[in-house]
Amino acid sequence: MFRRTTLLALPALALTAFIVRGPPDPLRPSTPADGVGPLTRRRYWAEVEGATRTPQDMAADWRSRLPQHAPKALAWFRGLDHAAPPIAQGDRLWILLLGTRRARVIIEHVDDLGFRARTLRLHPDAGTSEFRVLPGSQAGRMVVQVESVMRTHSRFDRVAYILGVHAAQRITWERVLDSVVAYSGGRIVNRGHESVELPMLPHVPALVAGQSA
């Protein structure tokens, strides 16, 4: 019995060792071509009215207080190369997901209405996430959203996503949006999330969050 239990534990130990060790070249930027499974576009959004701050003010606060906007039990952010905030183009961030899973990203684009992060190899996904404030047609109205275009980094991460990580991911970004909207001085009048999976292809399209397919 002891020998059988030991044999059954070996795969779990090997998997744990693989996760702890991490991938080779862990700080290299990754693209969906580095992942497995379907290419997935996910969008989490909140429509706001009555905001007393401008979209530009909100985007600047989002950049400067990203670690504070995120629920630490689900996603703990800090700077990898220096203290963060502030967050600027080229900065790399250290993230701890669900208190157990390591992740690293680089801020590859910043403008007045948002910023985009790209995963590094040490991340459960491979692709980009866009954090954006979209001005409405009237003062005080806007849409705040997080949009990602990714594949999972490994088959283990794909299984974990299906078994429940997707729910934790949704809760994380919804709470981030709640925090950003609270800073706006307005209120959420509509919200939602959507996920679209594209078939796994020999050549993965070079999609970036915020751009059309």
Image: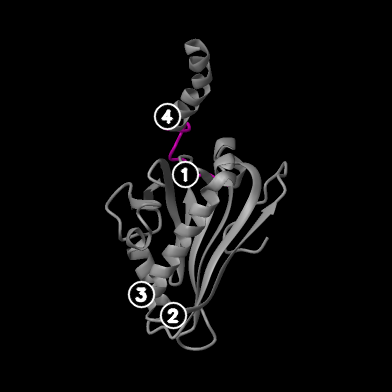
Foreground residue among 33 and 155: 155
Taking the magenta stretch, the answer to whether it contains residue 97 is no
Residue tagged 2: 187
* Mark with earlier residue (4, 2): 4
Q: CA distance from mark 2 to mark 1?
A: 35 Å
Residue tagged 1: 120
Taking the magenta stretch, the answer to whether it contains residue 21 is yes
Residue tagged 4: 21
Pair 1/4: label in front = 4
Residue 79 at what x, y percent from top left? 32, 51
Amino acid found under the numbered disc labelled 1: Leu
Residue tagged 3: 183
Residues at marks 3 and 2 touching, judged by CB atoms closer than 8 Å: no
* Mark with earlier residue (3, 1): 1
Here the colouring is one colour
Residue 86 at what x, y percent from top left? 31, 61
Q: Is residue 139 visible?
A: yes
**Eyeballing the image, is 117 above or below 154?**
below
Residue 190 located left or right of residue 37? left
* Mark with earlier residue (1, 4): 4
Q: CA distance from mark 3 to mark 1?
A: 30 Å
Mark 4: give few (<14), some (14-19) or many (20+) Cα within 10 Å.
Answer: few
Q: CA distance from mark 3 to mark 2?
A: 10 Å
Q: Is residue 57 visible?
A: no
Q: Residue at x 43, y 86 (%)?
A: 50
Q: Which stretch is magenta?
A: 20-31
Pair 4/2: label in front = 2
**Eyeballing the image, is 170 above or below 62?**
above
Looking at the rendered structure, the secondary structure element under dot 2 is strand
Q: Residue at x 51, y 58 (%)?
A: 170
Residue 195 located left or right of residue 50? right
